[in-house]
Image (cartoon, rainbow, N blue to C red):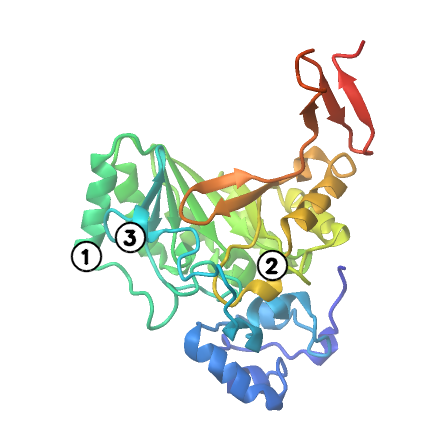
């Protein structure tokens, strides 16, 4: 359920929290949890920006923002089926920094660092201090060479890590390099920065994202309507007003957005910001994330609750990344089925109220 945090209990913080003692000093975790926090931080990166820390209600043990960013001992419990590379990036990595899974698009992982580290990240074994390094000049050149040598690649998706933690100068160079490849027409940037560090989205950075000859899209990752603060909305407006369209991607998370009211509020907030809801991801089988995953049946029921009751503009695609690198597929509820054995050519269609109709009608 959505709620307003107890902001009076939260003191704005001057810097990103990265260590157990900092989380405890900020009131985001009890001192008794020090050993637990340190154990998780020794395995997975931790970073909570001042903007996200300020949204957390320390008095609420199930705070939806804290569940996303503050470590929990549950993360050290690895369940069967969970793997370090749950969607199989590595088998589709022809050169360092590139993941080429689909014919017409490729991921370009230009950094291994994020502004925040989500507790459910599917690349949690690959990103953060000690796990990922920036591409060397030689690796960067080889990645560009691969993109240049494969004319079927129409779209490049900048990811990592979070590309928007890079300097405007560095980003402008990447965009120029991609714009110089004739067959690349679209660059999509996956980021959390407009929400978790909105001040970074200034005029210089926005200008750096534009290059002649390519269309630039920004895909914003946010999972709860409280993340879309006034500052975050203003950051998104700076991108959109500069002619950069935005879409959203969210992860369905237990305790964060796994009820129809919160999911509706999130999708409506996106649309009110001129951001088109794009993907609602089913949680990947990353290690130590079982406590945040919901079942596919629960996800389908939530999508049924949105369909017909909430504007079509607010409908994301509910998708599953098939483990093993087989790609994303829509896994929302089905509304169409053959009538009987299908010999009549008629179908049974379920409307948003659950009533079933024959098509074409008699």
Cα gap from disc 1 to disc 3, whole angstroms = 12 Å
Residue 206 or 326: which is nearer the viewer?
A: 326
Q: Relative to 313, is 81 above or below? A: below
Q: Relative to 137, is 248 above or below? A: above
Q: Nearer the viewer, mark 1 or mark 2?
A: 2
* Residue position for label 1: 137
Among numbered discs 1 and 2, the one appearing first in the sequence: 1
Q: Quadrant of the N terminus?
A: bottom right
Q: Which mark is residue 97?
A: 3
Q: Position of residue 143 (x, y in %)?
A: 23, 47
Q: Nearer the viewer, mark 1 or mark 3?
A: 3
SS category of the residue bearing label 2: loop
Q: Relative to 125, is 208 above or below? A: above
Among the 4 quarters of the image, the one containing residue 58: bottom right
Q: Quadrant of the C terminus?
A: top right
The residue depicted at 64 percent of the width and 59 percent of the height is: 229
Q: Position of residue 53 (x, y in %)?
A: 60, 72
Q: Position of residue 17 (x, y in %)?
A: 51, 77
As drawn, the residue found furthest toward the top would be 362
Q: Is 185 on the left or on the right of 352, as rendered?
A: left
Q: Which mark is residue 279?
A: none
As drawn, the residue found furthest toward the front would be 341
Q: Residues within 10 Å of mark 1 (few under 14, many from 20)?
A: few
* Residue position for label 2: 293
Q: Position of residue 36 (x, y in %)?
A: 54, 84
Cα gap from disc 2 to disc 3, whole angstroms = 28 Å
């Amino acid at each position: 359920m959505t709620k307003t945090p107890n902001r009076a209990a939260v003191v704005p913080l001057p810097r990103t929290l990265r260590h157990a003692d900092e989380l405890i000093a900020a009131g985001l975790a009890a001192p008794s949890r020090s050993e637990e926090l340190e154990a998780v931080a020794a395995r997975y990166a931790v970073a909570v920006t001042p903007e996200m820390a300020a949204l957390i209600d320390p008095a609420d043990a199930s705070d939806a923002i804290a569940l996303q960013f503050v470590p929990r001992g549950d993360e050290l419990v690895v369940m069967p089926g969970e793997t370090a590379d749950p969607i199989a990036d590595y088998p589709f990595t022809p050169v360092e920094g590139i993941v080429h899974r689909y014919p017409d698009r490729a991921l370009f992982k230009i950094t291994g660092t994020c502004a925040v580290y989500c507790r459910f990240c599917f690349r949690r074994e690959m990103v953060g201090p000690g796990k990922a390094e920036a591409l060397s000049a030689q690796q960067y050149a080889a990645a560009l060479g691969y993109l240049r040598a494969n004319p079927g690649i129409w779209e490049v998706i900048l990811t990592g890590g979070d590309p928007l933690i890079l300097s405007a100068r560095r980003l402008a160079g990447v965009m120029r390099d991609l714009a110089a490849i004739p067959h690349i027409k679209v660059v999509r940037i996956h980021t959390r920065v407009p929400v978790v560090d909105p001040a970074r989205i200034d005029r210089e950075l926005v200008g750096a994202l534009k290059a002649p000859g390519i269309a630039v899209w920004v895909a914003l990752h946010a999972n709860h309507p409280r993340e879309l603060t006034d500052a975050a909305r203003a950051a998104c407006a700076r991108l959109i007003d500069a002619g950069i369209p935005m879409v959203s991607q969210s992860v369905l998370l237990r305790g964060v957005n796994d009820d129809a009211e919160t999911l509706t509020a999130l999708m409506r907030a996106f649309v009110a910001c001129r951001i088109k809801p794009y993907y609602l991801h089913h949680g990947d089988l990353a290690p130590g994330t079982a406590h945040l995953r919901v079942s596919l049946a629960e996800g389908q029921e939530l999508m049924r609750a949105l369909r017909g009751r909430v504007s079509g503009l607010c409908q994301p695609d509910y998708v599953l990344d098939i483990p093993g690198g087989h790609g994303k597929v829509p896994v929302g509820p089905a509304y169409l089925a053959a009538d009987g054995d299908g010999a009549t050519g008629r179908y049974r269609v379920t409307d948003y109220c659950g009533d079933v109709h024959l098509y074409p009608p008699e």
